Image (tube, rainbow, N blue to C red):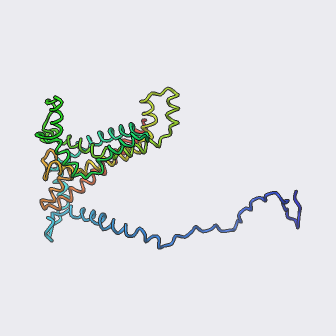
């Protein structure tokens, strides 16, 4: 019931009045202003990043164009000669690059597959699964030097654990020299790298797998989908983001296996175990700082390109799935 008072309609008591429309000429409330002092909080981090990352990177580009030996105040600009030398006139650098690409390929494939397998087996939060996760994750908390010396003992051809176990179970024919075999040494180090970090990547996969709704598996099982079909259509697409993280991180790890290689193979490592990071270190040690800076830039560009290429391939794989 409404009553007209002075030409205006008043709603009877007990009924809600309609919302008042905003004034046409009214101004919107201005957003809350941020205190300018808040912008000072990230300043220390920005200064540290600039001083320890940005400026050294810019200096590396400068030194890469010189013949600086690292000690003398004088140096000459040589243009792109250091880059041309790296790609056309340095067999040691070419060998290290080839070794690093082989090492990266083996480690990325093996570590991604092994960590995914562990994640699938240990997804449930049962006591046994949690305990096994802790066991597989344990090597990750060890230092690279400790891992290198442990596996150096395992691979020792005379009194190492590997040959001792093979001899004890009557498999003397499988005994080998491991790191002493130039054709196989790099792959045995790759085994060490996978053992070292697979548990860490397993945790990433467990987190991704536990986020998959169980209803999807139940519906697929009711439709008669087998294990492979459920993995292909549900598991793999859902863990694709985790796989991208694992592949990118594993790639960077395989390029930065400097301390592991030096701990196992010594300094300097032999050519069959020489990778880009150890080659750059040797160039710096020989007081060829300009050339080492150029090698470092090539090294950085390779990591960026390989990581980008892997992400593209993963996206194509996801679309096909």
Q: Image check: 317 left or right of 143?
A: right
What count of labels does the image hold?
Answer: 0
Residue 18, given in percent of the width and then of the height, sits at 77, 58
Q: Image check: 124 left or right of 2?
A: left
Identify the residue at image location x=25%, y=49%. 255
Identify the residue at image location x=25%, y=45%. 193
State whether residue 229 is above or below residue 10.
above
Can residue 309 be seen in the rendering of this structure? no
Residue 167, given in percent of the width and then of the height, sits at 15, 32
Can residue 236 be seen in the rendering of this structure? yes
Identify the residue at image location x=18%, y=53%. 278
| Quarter of the figure with the C terminus | top left
* Foreground of the two, 269 or 99: 269
* Foreground of the two, 172 or 34: 172
Rendered image quadrant of residue 208: top left
State whether residue 188 is above or below residue 268.
above
Rendered image quadrant of residue 50: bottom left
Rendered image quadrant of residue 174: top left
Residue 102, given in percent of the width and then of the height, sits at 23, 42
Residue 180, given in percent of the width and then of the height, sits at 12, 41
| Quarter of the figure with the N terminus | bottom right
Q: Image check: 134 left or right of 175?
A: right
Q: Residue furthest left?
A: 158
Q: Residue furthest top?
A: 224
């Amino acid at each position: 019931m409404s009553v007209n008072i002075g030409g205006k309609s008043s709603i009877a008591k007990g009924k809600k009045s309609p919302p008042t429309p905003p004034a046409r000429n009214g101004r919107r409330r201005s957003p809350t202003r941020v205190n300018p002092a808040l912008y000072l909080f990230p300043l220390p981090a920005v200064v540290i990043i600039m001083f320890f990352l940005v400026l050294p990177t810019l200096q590396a580009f400068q030194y890469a164009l010189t013949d600086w030996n690292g000690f003398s105040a004088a140096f000459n600009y040589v243009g792109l000669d250091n880059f041309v030398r790296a790609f056309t006139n340095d067999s040691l650098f070419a060998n290290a690059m080839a070794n690093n690409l082989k090492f990266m390929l083996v480690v990325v494939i093996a570590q991604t597959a092994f960590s995914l397998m562990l994640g699938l087996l240990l997804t449930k939060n049962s006591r046994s699964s949690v305990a096994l996760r802790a066991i597989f994750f344990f090597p990750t908390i060890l230092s690279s030097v400790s891992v290198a010396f442990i596996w150096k003992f395992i691979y020792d051809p005379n009194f190492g654990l590997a040959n001792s176990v093979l001899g004890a179970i009557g498999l003397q024919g499988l005994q080998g020299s491991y790191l002493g075999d130039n054709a196989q040494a790099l792959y045995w180090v790759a085994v060490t790298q996978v053992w070292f970090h697979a548990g860490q990547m397993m945790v990433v996969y467990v987190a991704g797998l536990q986020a998959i709704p169980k209803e999807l598996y139940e519906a697929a099982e009711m439709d008669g989908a087998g294990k492979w079909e459920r993995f292909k259509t549900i598991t793999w697409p859902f863990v694709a983001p985790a796989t991208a993280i694992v592949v990118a991180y594993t790639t960077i790890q395989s390029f930065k296996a400097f301390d592991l290689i030096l701990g196992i193979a010594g300094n300097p490592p032999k050519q069959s175990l020489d990778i880009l990071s150890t080659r750059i270190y040797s160039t710096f040690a020989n007081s060829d700082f300009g050339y080492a800076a150029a090698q470092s830039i090539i090294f950085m560009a390779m990591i960026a390109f390989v990581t980008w290429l892997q992400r593209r391939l993963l996206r194509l794989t996801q679309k096909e799935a």
